[in-house]
């Protein structure tokens, strides 16, 4: 039996998704494709709708704000993570890349052979990068946070 990683992975993710959400997303994409509308203009319009709905609701219910979608299914507005967290995750990713290049290439007896060994090595590098970034890291997150201070109206832009 031949297994191709990319299509199988996509199908597994699609199969794990909520069927109602899957159909709603498919319907939205089909409607956008058939209308021939400009993608950027459509996205701007949806952001405007979500911002209007969020402004109408109280601050306590901001995360549960809903707007009508193409097929009438509700759309949940998700709060953006704190900017420091985004920079920390970016630093963790950079550190993961550094660690992965530093791990030995010939390590089949430790990690295993083939794809499985590569996956284990990648998982180890990811966890090491996350742990290194949790502390003070190497300063990437701090520098990015200092260079890009948080805007005062982040909640308005996220919705």
Image (cartoon, rainbow, N blue to C red):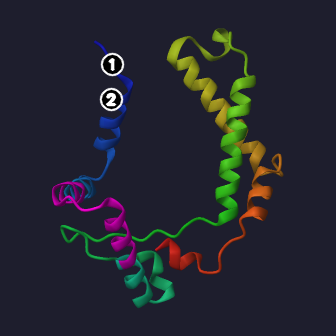
Residue 112 position within the rendered picture, expressed as x and y whole percent measured from the top left: 59, 13
Which residue is pictured at 21% across the width and 68% down the height? 70
Residue at the limit of the structure toward the left, as seen here = 34
- Name the secondary structure under disc 1: loop
Q: Which tag, 1 or 2, sits closer to the chain's start? A: 1
Residue 80 position within the rendered picture, expressed as x and y whole percent measured from the top left: 55, 67
Proximity of marks 1 and 2: CB atoms separated by less than 8 Å: yes
Spatial separation of the CA atoms under disc 1 and disc 2: 7 Å
Q: Which residue is mark 1?
A: 3
Residue 28 position within the rendered picture, expressed as x and y whole percent measured from the top left: 23, 60
Which residue is pictured at 61% across the width and 28% down the height? 122
State the image quarter where residue 85 is shown: bottom right
Labelled disc at residue 127: none
Q: Residues within 10 Å of mark 1 (few under 14, many from 20)?
A: few
Image quarter where the N terminus lies is top left
Q: Residues within 10 Å of mark 2 (few under 14, many from 20)?
A: few
Q: Image height check: is 105 above or below 9? A: above
Q: In this view of the protein, which residue sits in the foreground, 10 or 39?
A: 39
Which residue is pictured at 44% across the width and 87% down the height? 55
Q: Which residue is mark 2?
A: 8
Q: Which residues are magenta?
A: 28-48
- Name the secondary structure under disc 2: helix
């Amino acid at each position: 039996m031949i297994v191709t990683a990319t299509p199988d992975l996509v199908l597994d993710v699609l199969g794990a998704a909520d069927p109602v959400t899957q159909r709603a997303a498919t319907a939205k994409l089909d409607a956008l494709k058939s209308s021939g509308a400009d993608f950027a203009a459509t996205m701007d319009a949806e952001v405007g709708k979500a911002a209007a709905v969020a402004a109408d609701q109280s601050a306590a219910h901001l995360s549960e704000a809903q707007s009508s979608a193409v097929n009438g299914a509700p759309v949940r507005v998700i709060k953006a993570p704190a900017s420091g967290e985004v920079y920390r995750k970016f630093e963790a990713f950079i550190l993961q890349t550094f660690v992965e290049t530093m791990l030995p290439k010939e390590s089949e007896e430790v990690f295993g052979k083939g794809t499985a060994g590569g996956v284990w090595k990648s998982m180890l590098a990811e966890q090491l990068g996350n742990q290194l970034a949790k502390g003070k890291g190497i300063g990437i997150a701090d520098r990015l946070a200092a260079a890009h201070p948080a805007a005062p109206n982040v909640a308005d832009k996220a919705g």
